[in-house]
Image (cartoon, rainbow, N blue to C red):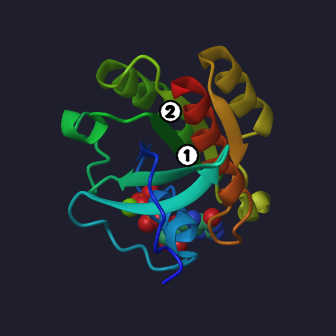
Amino acid sequence: RGDFNSKIDYVFKIVLIGDSAVGKSQLLARYARNEFSLDSKATIGVEFQTRTLEIDRKTVKAQIWDTAGQERYRAVTSAYYRGAMGAMLVYDITNRQSFDHMARWLDELRGHADKNIVIMLIGNKSDLGTLRAVPVDDAKEFAQRENLFFMETSALEATNVEPAFLNIMSEIYRVIS
Ligand code: GDP
Ligand code: MG
């Protein structure tokens, strides 16, 4: 086995939040297993997946948590947020409401999470540009105002998924080191 003498220097907990059906589970499937499914199976049970990477010659394990179909307002429990060092606030670029709900997800997050948490706004389904309902500028403006990192992604086409996770992991590393 190649990982014979590998050691983990850090574990970073990252939580995914946002409305139902924006693509949180598929982003995670794409990042952790390079898989994607068009079937939207509701996530059952709290679960996380991991992926290990190198940052600054350290071995860092991302432990990425996905909501258990708890996307209703205030249904996500404080245990979900506990110890989170990063959060991805995900909306669907074809669903205006999912973007308009980002403010209250952010409130929820800031009410529960550590004050140094690194937060990234993610506009997913960028492959569906013809159905776009959220202009990039609206998202950039919101992100700037709230001091969030921002990226558009497509879990389907695997666009920007790696960079988004790498970005949030690198920022967490900067915060703790
Ligand atoms: P969740 O409820 O936020 O976890 O959303 P899911 O990951 O279950 O995705 C909801 C639906 O959107 C599923 O049918 C996915 O196949 C679809 N989906 C997720 N990501 C993308 C994407 O990047 N592009 C497109 N076109 N569909 C996506
Ligand atoms: Mg899900």
Q: Quadrant of the C terminus?
A: top right
Q: Is residue 59 left or right of residue 66?
A: right
Q: Is residue 81 left or right of residue 50?
A: left
Q: Position of residue 88 (x, y in %)?
A: 51, 42
Q: Is residue 7 left or right of residue 173?
A: left
The structure residue drawn at horizontal position 47% and vertical position 57%, both measured from the top left corner, is 24
User: Residue under circle 2?
Assistant: 102
The structure residue drawn at horizontal position 74% and vertical position 63%, both measured from the top left corner, is 159
User: Residue under circle 1?
Assistant: 91
Point out the quarter of the image occupied by ligand 2. Answer: bottom left
Say if mark 2 contacts mark 1, CB within 8 Å: yes
Identity, as a three-letter code, of the amino acid under mark 1: Tyr
Q: Secondary structure at mark 1?
A: strand
Count of numbered badges drawn on the protein: 2
**Viewer-proximal residue among 99 and 107:** 107
Q: Position of residue 80 (x, y in %)?
A: 26, 42
How far apart, in angstroms, are the residues tagged by discs 2 and 1? 7 Å
**Depicted 59 relative to depicted 34: above or below:** above
Are there few (<14), some (14-19), or many (20+) residues within 10 Å of tag 1? many
Q: Secondary structure at mark 2?
A: helix
Q: Position of residue 57 (x, y in %)?
A: 65, 48
Badge 1 residue CB within 8 Å of ligand 1: no
The structure residue drawn at horizontal position 35% and vertical position 74%, both measured from the top left corner, is 41
